[in-house]
Image (tube, rainbow, N blue to C red):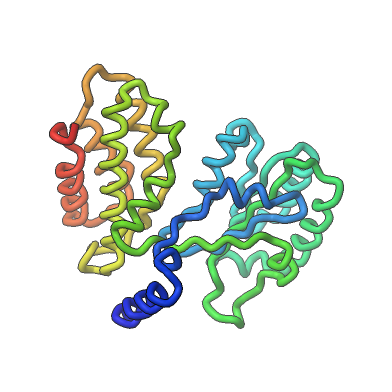
Amino acid sequence: HRVLLFFCRNFVEEKMGSKYVKGRSTDLSEVYKESSPSSPLFFILSPGVDPLKDVEALGTRLGFTIDNGKIHNVSLGQGQEVVAEHAMEVAAAEGHWVILQFLLQNIHLVARWLSTLEKLVEHHSLESHPEYRLFMSAEPAPSPETHIIPQGLLDNSIKITSEPPTGMRANLHGALDLFNQEILEQCSKESEFRCILFALCYFHAAVAERRRFGTQGWNRSYPFNNGDLTVSVNVLQNYLEANAKVPWDDLRYLFGEIMYGGHITDDWDRRLCRTYLSEYVQPEML
């Protein structure tokens, strides 16, 4: 399988150019500009990819957060239909964002409600607040027979699919793309912040890439995602601002035992995670 993928990539690169095999991640802010109250954004999920963190990050930049009540996040399941309907009604009137998550294990519980959702989306596309947006996310159905998302809902949405990067370079680019120049300049200890941020991105790329190798990479499968990295960078900034010197041991503990280590249940995997951090996050890097 991997040999076939290797030759397919080489063929595409030779015939069409390297940009078709080394693509960078799509900037969600650019896709957002194409959306409207009548054009929801629909994320087709892949393992290890969490685009909703990107939605929340974009919302923070534009003044939409869960804390200020301008983002309504609903995981659809039994009994959540009324919650979703109310959130859409309020958001359409006041210009908020609504995130609807279709969980694969629960989607059968809301199958009958999906036709109602399609009508609500059409209804709220008319005369709604211009800042109202609807974001939806779902995993691909395992087979055509189990596909129950209404076709009309998909046709009227801007569909975005995000696949986990392949290879260390792609993983590293994907990690670095999460942070713009404004974020890099936020910390007063700019030199230390940039160096450790790059080390964190490299660490994130390494642990994510190891998942491709099954039990040879990690003894168990762990859902490392971009949210772990962005939270770690926020913690890094806070600790640098609060301490005169870089608290190396504290940072390694937080990253290895809580942020990323919170996913890890195997002792040997935890040891490996700590080893990576001791190599990448150390005083000699400054």
Q: Residue at coordinates 33% horizontally, 43% vertically from top-left?
A: 259
Pick the residue in front: 136 or 38.
38
Q: Position of residue 54 (x, y in %)?
A: 51, 47
**In the image: residue 135, left or right of residue 4:** right
Q: Quadrant of the N terminus?
A: bottom left
Q: Quadrant of the C terminus?
A: top left
Q: Position of residue 71 (x, y in %)?
A: 63, 40
**Does 114 appear above or below 127?**
below
**Which residue reaches farthest right?**
127
Q: Position of residue 226 (x, y in %)?
A: 41, 49
Pick the residue in front: 78 or 272.
272
How many callouts does the rendering have?
0
**In the image: residue 237, left or right of residue 42:** left
Quarter of the view holding residue 248: top left
**Does 4 appear above or below 229?**
below
Q: Position of residue 164 (x, y in %)?
A: 41, 61
Pick the residue in front: 234 or 283.
283
Pick the residue in front: 74 or 12.
12
**Does 152 appear above or below 102?**
below
Q: Residue at coordinates 38% horizontally, 61% vertically from top-left?
A: 165
Quarter of the view holding residue 97: top right
